[in-house]
């Protein structure tokens, strides 16, 4: 499979189907941003800003968060058990059908 389909729900509740290539070493933040969703990604994907915070709405088994991601989520707003930093999730073929929701903007 060369690409995966991911459903992203924006902060207005609007659903967007995005297609992300699996062979370009992209992360979820880049895929969302590249599809026009409002993801600031202030730190550029370094797990330092949490503006790429998303909730994972499906039960896909994703890579465990690194210590850096967990530390950043510890200081983010409105963190839930299904919170992840989009920039720390590499697009993989087993992500097909994933549904994510953008976390509220902390501003
Ligand atoms: S882009 Fe800053 S933490 Fe993900």
Image: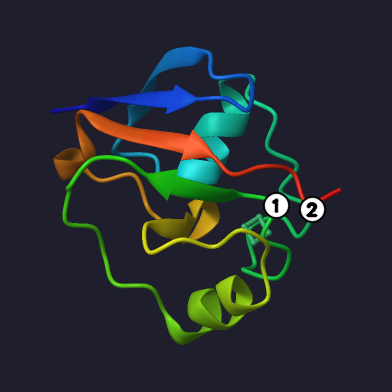
Residue corresponding to mark 1: 51
Residue 18: where, in percent of width, then height?
41, 18
Label pair 2/1, CB-CB below 8 angstroms: yes
Instruction: Find out if the beta carbon at label 1 lies less than 8 Å from the nearest ligand 1 atom.
Output: yes
Q: Secondary structure at mark 2?
A: loop
Q: Secondary structure at mark 1?
A: loop
Instruction: Find out if the beta carbon at label 2 lies less than 8 Å from the nearest ligand 1 atom.
Output: yes
For ligand 1, which image quadrant applies? bottom right
Q: Is residue 46 above or below residue 71?
A: above
x 46%, y 61%: residue: 80
- Dot in front, 2 or 1: 1
Q: Quadrant of the N terminus?
A: top left
Dot placed on the residue nearer the N-terminal end, 2 or 1: 2
Label ID, residue 30: none
Q: Quadrant of residue 105?
A: top right
How far, Cα to Cα, is label 2 from label 1?
7 Å
| Relative depth, front residue between 30 and 76 | 76
Q: Is residue 71 above or below residue 40?
A: below
Q: Residues within 10 Å of mark 2 (few under 14, many from 20)?
A: few
Label ID, residue 42: 2
């Amino acid at each position: 499979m060369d690409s995966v389909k991911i459903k992203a729900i924006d902060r207005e509740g609007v659903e967007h189907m995005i297609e992300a290539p699996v062979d370009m070493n992209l992360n979820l933040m880049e895929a969302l941003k590249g599809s026009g969703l409002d993801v600031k990604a202030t730190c550029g994907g370094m797990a330092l800003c949490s503006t790429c915070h998303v909730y994972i709405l499906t039960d896909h088994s994703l890579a465990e968060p690194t210590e850096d991601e967990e530390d950043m989520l510890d200081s983010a707003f409105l963190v839930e058990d299904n919170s992840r930093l989009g920039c720390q999730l590499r697009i993989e073929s087993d992500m097909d059908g994933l549904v994510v929701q953008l976390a509220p903007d902390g501003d």
